[in-house]
Image (spheres, rainbow, N blue to C red):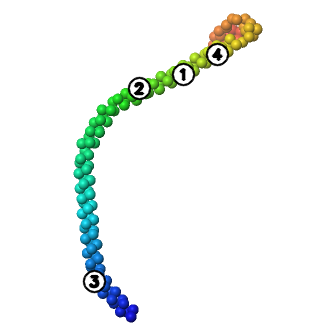
């Protein structure tokens, strides 16, 4: 019984395998045809995009010079801001040092140097004498 089943299955496979192989080849040919058409369509689309891409490149070239100007202007503004911050910091330090000197009481300023300013030269000590 099992032998008869295997013989019948063998006869069926011998008959169906060539038919299934032919169907698979036909399906593969149809798939390749559609793939070929897709590639041709993509080539045409790319060819149609060439003028558009050229136009975009021209527009970008026209925009590049104003963008360069904006970049230079931005750098100049950054430099001005840095210098302004630096100058305001120096001015604030100057004002703070001057106001700190005015906040001394009159007794302290009279006791310290009697209102006179002593300028030291390099190499002199506090009394104005040169170091030996």
SS at circle 4: helix
Label 4 neighbourhood size at 10 Å, few (<14), some (14-19), many (20+)? few
Location of residue 101 in the rendering, given as x and y in whole percent from the top left corner = 68, 13
Location of residue 31 in the rendering, given as x and y in whole percent from the top left corner = 27, 65
Q: CA distance from mark 2 to mark 4?
A: 36 Å
Taking the spot 36% from the left edge, 89% from the top edge, the residue there is: 6
Instruction: Compare marks 1 and 4 and give the one earlier in the sequence.
Output: 1
> Looking at the picture, does residue 41 appear above or below residue 26?
above
Q: Which residue is mark 3?
A: 15
Q: Is residue 132 visible?
A: no
Q: Nearer the viewer, mark 2 or mark 3?
A: 3
> Looking at the picture, does residue 24 appear above or below residue 51?
below
Instruction: Compare marks 2 and 1 and give the one earlier in the sequence.
Output: 2
Location of residue 42 in the rendering, given as x and y in whole percent from the top left corner = 26, 53
> Looking at the picture, does residue 129 appear above or below residue 47?
above
Instruction: Compare marks 4 and 3 and give the one earlier in the sequence.
Output: 3
Q: Quadrant of the N terminus?
A: bottom left
SS at circle 3: helix
Q: CA distance from mark 2 to mark 1?
A: 20 Å
Q: Which residue is mark 1?
A: 86
Instruction: State the image quarter where residue 90 is shown.
Output: top right
C-beta proximity under 8 Å, tags 1 and 4: no
Instruction: Compare marks 2 and 3 and give the one earlier in the sequence.
Output: 3
C-beta proximity under 8 Å, tags 2 and 1: no
Q: CA distance from mark 1 to mark 3?
A: 95 Å
Q: Which residue is mark 2?
A: 73
Q: Which residue is mark 4?
A: 97
Q: Nearer the viewer, mark 1 or mark 3?
A: 3
Nearest to the observer: residue 13 or residue 124: 13
Q: Nearer the viewer, mark 2 or mark 1?
A: 2
């Amino acid at each position: 019984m099992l032998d008869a089943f295997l013989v019948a299955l063998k006869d069926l496979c011998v008959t169906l395998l060539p038919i299934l192989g032919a169907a698979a080849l036909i399906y593969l040919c149809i798939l390749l045809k559609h793939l070929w058409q897709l590639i041709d369509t993509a080539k045409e689309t790319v060819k149609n995009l060439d003028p558009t891409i050229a136009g975009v490149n021209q527009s970008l070239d026209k925009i590049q010079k104003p963008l360069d100007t904006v970049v230079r202007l931005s750098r100049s503004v950054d430099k001005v801001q840095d210098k302004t911050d630096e100058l305001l910091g120096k001015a604030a330090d100057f004002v703070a040092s001057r106001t700190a000197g005015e906040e001394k009481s009159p007794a302290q300023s009279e006791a310290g140097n009697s209102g006179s300013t002593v300028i030291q030269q390099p190499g002199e000590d506090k009394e104005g004498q040169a170091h030996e």
